[in-house]
Image (cartoon, rainbow, N blue to C red):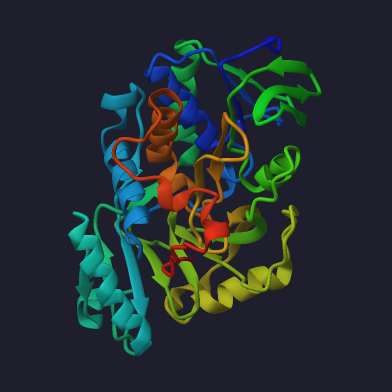
Amino acid sequence: MNLPKKADVVIIGGGLTGIAIAYYLAQKKCTDVVVLERNKLLGIESTGRNAGGIRAQFGTKVNIEFSFETIKIFENFEKLVGEPLEFNQCGYLFMTENQTLWENFKKNVKLQNDCGVDSKLVTPEEIKKRYPLIKTEDLLGGTFWQRDGIIDPSSVLLGYEKQARKAGVKIITEAEVKNIETSGKKITKIITNLGEIQTDTVVIAAGAWSKNIGKMVGIDFPAIPIKRQIVSTLPLGIPEDFPMVVNMDTGSYLHRESGGILMGWADPNQKESLSIETDFDYTMEIIERSVPRLPILEQAEILTEWAGLYCTTPDHHEILGKVKEFEGLVCAFGFSGHGIMHASAVGICIAEEIVDGKASFIDLEPLRFERFANGKLIEEKNVI
């Protein structure tokens, strides 16, 4: 497809967030939309390199709201979007042996319950009875919600992409943004390797590359690309109802993957980088943090390993909505590892902000870029 000369809205980034925004814009009859993706295929960066976890068990109201809304969409995806989707609601199980974290668990569950998420505290005995493979002797307890689960993000993206194209959205691959031209406080033009496109509304949804896009208009967004690594094993006979297990004491997580186990860990010592080369020591650290909670991993053989990128902000919340610096410049990045969990709800909110002037069901004000200047951060501590 050739690059159009102009468009009402241009979205930079063809991952799940960008495509979801395009779909929901089309649902609001805004179909003169162009999505620019620098790769040959959509969703092969962070969308295609994550663990697929979906959870509403967060520690801030806005994160809970975004995830809960997305979960409801996934539960009814075929009815709402018109495409099939398999959502394995095996649940998320958070665990700790630390008293301070245990007290935080109690506060989080109360907040989640207040937001309509009926998560619950669980004892070590309850965990062991339901999931005997997990070592529980030294635990204080955990939290669990059955409607959390695992999804294939590529399937979600494909569903949105198919319907967005049907509605008239133009999705251009191998289109790398080189510069964004402005006049005063207005966006005027995007320069790409395929040519120029005029527009007065640009959505930055480029994930870990969003910081670089921001620099094109002179804005230094605090959205840092950080490498995260994952390793999976050959089949171990893990039962199908095994949950996503999060060990908050070590920061590691794991879930069933094709009868084996997928493991990950957010290494806090990783520096800002766009590199996705795997590192042997990183892989070994992930395994060492996972084995004590799931001893069957001592028998495991590694199947594969890969790395992807988080786009991380100082308070672990996304940067969303219009910015004061330029009319028509809209942010949708900085998810800090929660992009798949929030992309659908964010897509609705960003489409509403562009078309209607304001999101209808979630207040975007606490998530705007300006919060970093005024010091009004909302710290999410329940991150992995």
Furthest-front residue in this view? 184
Residue 281, position as x, y percentages in the image: 71, 73
Q: Residue at x 62, y 72 (%)?
A: 268
Residue 271, position as x, y percentages in the image: 72, 66
Q: Is residue 362 above or below residue 4?
A: below
Q: Residue at x 49, y 23 (%)?
A: 161
86 or 226: nearer the viewer: 226
Residue 330, by quadrant, is: top right
Q: Residue at x 35, y 47 (%)?
A: 66
Residue 303, by quadrant, is: bottom right
Q: Is residue 91 above or below residue 131?
A: above
371 or 274: nearer the viewer: 371
Q: Is residue 330 above or below residue 166?
A: below
Q: Determine if residue 46 is in view.
A: yes
Which image quarter is the N terminus in?
top right
Residue 189, position as x, y percentages in the image: 71, 21
Residue 99, position as x, y percentages in the image: 34, 89
Q: Determine if residue 134 is in view.
A: no
Q: Is residue 39 left or right of residue 72?
A: right
